Amino acid sequence: MLPSDFGADMIGQWVGQHLWPLFRIASFMMVIPFIGTQLVPARIRLGLALLITILVVPTLDEVPQVEALSADAVVITLQQILIGVGMGFALTALFQLFVITGQMIAMQMGLGFASMVDPSNGISVPVLSQLYSISVMLLYLAMNGHLVAFDVFVESFRTLPIGLEGLSQEGVWALAHRISWMFVSAMLLALPAVTAVLIVNISFGVMTRAAPQMNIFALGFPIGLLFGLFAIWVLQANFLPHFQLYSEQTFQFMRELQGQP
């Protein structure tokens, strides 16, 4: 026997209780690094999203009771997708920061032509960017960064409950300005190596003016490349502290995006 109150409203409430969290979680899983890349098939990502949804739904509050095909239902769905994509983008910016750093250093060293296909994004990037990308990914997994990211994301269901209100206008602008943070941080990270190579190039410019017979192209390229590699080797000692600092800033930004202090 079915309960007396079993009907369209109850079915809609049950579907919304599971479907709207799934939209937010699936959007997050499709964007974040490592899981949201082309290396992981879409079926596995969707399966993980379904599994996490089943685990998270019992801890959530009741969702709003709206009609399935109403305008309010569409707004709630779009809000959940925006929250998931926004938080995933904040985490993706952390990884792209180091890719941009590698591109800046490689272009100054003369290694911009030495590129390879990045299997995670499907585009060609300099070898140095791929080295940084692999290093960051291994550090991210070794430091349980994925667990922290999911913990912060699941917390969003409490600070940003499912409803008509989602990310504020300030949160959307903060996401747009996050691109500036990514480029500024990449520039600060690449500045020592870029400066070292620049000093070498200036020195060769002075030597060329003093001795025009010297072939600057035969000497400047290999020496500039060696100095660039030496600068990268020196900077590797501070790679972990920089990664930890930018990771803390990223997770703090994800909390602030939810309205947490």
Image (cartoon, rainbow, N blue to C red):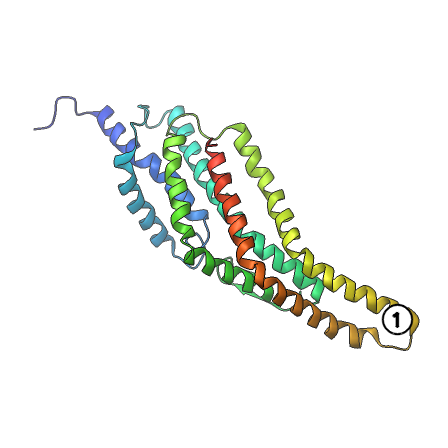
Residue furthest to the top: 4
Q: Is residue 199 above or below residue 244?
A: below
> Can the viewer see residue 168?
yes
State the image coordinates of residue 182 (x, y, percent, origin top left): 60, 47
Q: Is residue 18 above or below residue 137?
A: above
State the image coordinates of residue 154 (x, y, percent, origin top left): 37, 39
Left/right of residue 90 with respect to residue 150 in the rendered view: right
Relative depth, front residue between 172 and 212: 212
Mark 1 is surrounded, within 10 Å at the Cα level, by few (under 14), some (14 to 19) or many (20 or more) other residues, namely: some
Relative depth, front residue between 63 and 223: 223
State the image coordinates of residue 93 (x, y, percent, origin top left): 54, 48
Q: Give the residue displayed 62% in from the left and 52% down from the top.
A: 186
Q: Helix, strand or loop at disc 1? A: helix
Snapshot quadrant of residue 193: bottom right
Q: Give the residue displayed 37% in from the left and 34% down from the top.
A: 157
Q: Give the residue displayed 40% in from the left and 29% down from the top.
A: 76
Relative depth, front residue between 65 and 200: 200
Q: Amino acid at mark 1?
A: Thr
Left/right of residue 104 with respect to residue 5 in the rendered view: right
Q: Which residue is mark 1?
A: 208
State the image coordinates of residue 202 (x, y, percent, origin top left): 82, 64
Relative depth, front residue between 115 and 180: 180
Image quarter of the N terminus: top left
